[in-house]
Image (cartoon, rainbow, N blue to C red):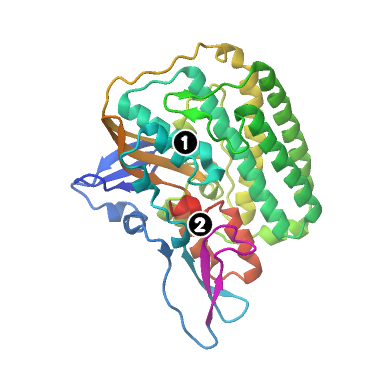
Amino acid sequence: MKILIGIITAKEDEQLFILDNGLPSLISTDGYDPEKMYGNYSMLKQHSLLINDKLMSGPGVFKFRYGPVTSGVREAGSFHLYTYGEKILRATIDMRWKHREMRKAMQNKPPEAALLMAERICSNFAISHSVALSKAVEMALGINPSLRTKNWRTLLIEAERIYNNLHLIYKLTSSAAQKVLAAHIGALFEKALRLNEKLAESRFLMNINNIGKLNHIPEISDIQKVANGYRELAERFTKLYKHSLANYNYLDRLHSAGIITPDQAGKLGLTGPSLRACGIKDNLNNTTEHLISLPVITKNQGDALARMEVRAEEIVNSCQYLVNHIRASDSWANIEEKDAEPTKTSGTGYAVVNSPSGALGYYLDVTEGKVQNVEIFTPSYPGMYAVSGVLEGQIFTDFPFVFDSFGVHFADAAC
């Protein structure tokens, strides 16, 4: 399966950034029409920050502006919802509020400085952005990190997936007025952040990753405490999740909200839980050499409920993965950590990581120790197009279930 996740325009010859069976590759556009091959080519080529911006008129139709910061829209981004009352006829999404031109800001910076910028693009995905950029730099400079560094990066991304998925489910339960359930999920979210702090000395997993290495390694005693913490978190969440599946007041709010078909998901180039909720595997696990296999969760309905179910089951799997991996850490945790040295001073690199919301990719050049021609491709960008499309025809009370279930962020989409 091939998924187009970005277009490289930094050089004279246009190249396509492809996810081929989960692995990143670059393909030249010479000799064929990429617009016919990939339904999302035009979308990625234009890279508009104003999605589905078409005026609508008719008897009683008016435009309702929602955002840039209000209840339900927690970032600087806004929606222009066309309606004549209860039904949403069209949803224009304005992401210009969060456009900070991060690619330009990274130009001519040392890789370490660019790394600090990357992990602050969207704090929810800090370690995913950090690892993707560092892997691209390492490819460009011929740096081969140690097994211990590679393994800890994998664990940290799974830790990021856990707290992101918990927060998303917390928002869904809150919107469905399930206050007791939301309170319990919120408590687990806080527990996950505290476990992050034990792992990385940062609740949002910042400042631990570096080019070719980690800034620090968790102590063995803390590792065991963290393993016990994730085991307890999985047990508590499993009980809550099973209880929630018997709550039809909750499930009915998510069922059939924001349905996206496999064909629509493919044309948009969706990855991650939004694609897997349509019954399609994106093979993103292939981006990492797992010492212990990590199951891939899929559902078939393609609605907000299916997206929630995928993320809920991923929480349990990721917790178990962390516990099992840490238990097996004797084979790699004590490996001597040496700084991986570059074998060249200039080069081109690219990488993709399996972030909580899908494929997150970086492309860049490094010239004499400075980063050049940075391209960033995030799952939130096609996700915003999906949100805009499926909101049409929904009623206003379905808005939070559609928007939150895709796990998209304005900061991530408009970087």
Residue at disc 1, secondary structure: helix
- Residue 2 on the magenta segment: no
Q: Is residue 280 above or below residue 25?
A: below
Front residue of 306 and 395 = 395
| Sequence-wise first label, 2 or 1 | 1
Q: Residue at x 59, y 61 (%)?
A: 73
> In the figure, 41 relative to 8: above or below?
below
- The answer to whether any part of residue 262 appears in the image is no
Q: Residue at x 43, y 77 (%)?
A: 55
Circle 2 sits on which residue? 261
Q: In the rendered image of this protein, does residue 262 appear above or below residue 310?
A: below
> In x, y percent, where is residue 293?
56, 26
Residue displayed at 45% across by 14% down: 338
Residue 333: % across, % down: 57, 15
**Left-right relation of 13 to 72:** left
- Amino acid on which the number 1 mark rests in the picture: Ser
Q: Of 232 and 246, which appears nearest the observer?
A: 232
What range of the chain is rendered magenta? Answer: 62-81
Q: How far across and how far down the image is residue 87, in percent?
A: 59, 75
Q: Count residues near mark 1 (Cα–Cα under 10 Å), then give few for <14, some for 14-19, many for 20+.
A: many
For residue 130, the mark is: 1
